[in-house]
Amino acid sequence: MPGPLSLSFDTVAQGGKRALARALSDIEANDGHPDVARLLDEAATEARAHVVGLTGPPGVGKSTLTNALIRHWRSEGQSVGVVAVDPSSQISSGALLGDRTRLDTDPTDQQVFVRSMAARDRLGGLSDEALAAIILMRALFDRVLVESVGIGQSEADIAFAADSIVLCIQPGSGDSLQFMKAGVMELPDIVIVTKADMGSPARRARADVEGALSLALRKQQDWSVPVLLASAQDGTGLQDLVTALDAHFAHLVSTHSLTTQRDRQARQWMHDRIRRKFGQIGLKLSQFDRWHDSGLALFESERKSHEDLLRRLTDNS
Ligand code: GDP
């Protein structure tokens, strides 16, 4: 049994940004430790933030929009946690980005916390560390923004972690057609055509997206996906985005979907995690669902599954 870590949810909650940064590093360095599972399970029950996922191809304007949203929420006195997933840096290729983020926030502001994280794979998928950071930040801030590059199917990863998904599309890029082909149009709760200051190409892109959406399968029958024009440069459409996000969150709450959606996402993530570690057969043999259904917390069920599968594999060798 590994020794105890000095990690408790209360210490993190009371210790400000420094304690949070330390906890995230401890989580990364101690994957599979019972204290990490305990901390994350406790954080999962303390969820308070609206988690917004912002995705789209490189250069579409995600960072610019993230900066604008941070400023907007801070001006309302809301606290904001940001997870920026950097596809150019992969977990396997070494160090995390640290503070080399393109976001421009005030380091002395205790109510904004930005964590850059390496992507799980070349396509910008979310790592387990990113999910852990989201779960922890969700318990500590009013808003959590996850910015990730979406190229083809890797947008789907953000659906494991976000309450509301915003897909960003660049005018004149033909992206909507590509996204429709890749099945990505089924994912967003809100679509933003960025760089609206470009004029008619932006309006055309909006019409294309509306066309693509009308052909796509709907994730939620009772939510119609708004397609908004926004320019982070001149501020147009930012308020519309904020309003649409609030409306989507209110919709999740009023239809009692927020908790079920979060539970489903978390379970899917754990299945995916077990499958990545132990393959399809490992997932079949795993007791995760049985343990979790009988009341064992999420991260602890996964940790126990890992331990159990590993033991069975090595027992048979
Ligand atoms: P990301 O790679 O998706 O994060 O995109 P960035 O936010 O870094 O933006 C890519 C480029 O688009 C930068 O040169 C920005 O200055 C530019 N950009 C971002 N938002 C806007 C906008 O609303 N209008 C215009 N014209 N350019 C923008």
Image (cartoon, helix red, strand yellow):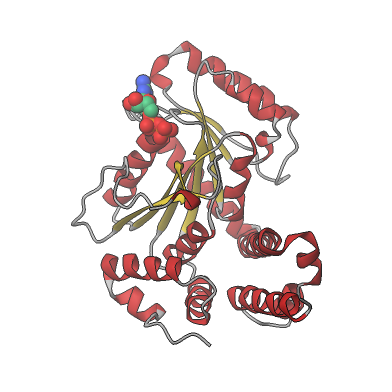
Question: Please, which residue is most extreme toward the left here?
Answer: 108
Vertical comparison of 143 with 243: above or below: below
15 left or right of 200 in image: left
Return the residue nearer the eye: 307 or 130: 307
Residue at position x 50%, y 52% in the image: 92
Q: Give percent across and percent down for residue 308.
A: 70, 79
Number of marks drawn:
0
Extreme residue toward the top, this view: 200
Q: Residue at x 65, y 82 (%)?
A: 296
Going 49% across and 24% down the picture, which residue do you hit? 170
Quarter assignment of residue 218: top right
Q: Name the quadrant of the C terminus.
A: bottom right
Quadrant assignment for ligand 1: top left
Q: Is residue 75 above or below residue 238?
A: below
Q: Nearer the viewer, residue 97 or 93?
A: 93
Residue at image x 32%, y 52%?
A: 98
Please provide percent x and percent y for residue 12: 35, 74
On screen, 6 above or below 218? below
Where's residue 114, x and y in %? 34, 53
Specify whether 216 is left or right of 158. right
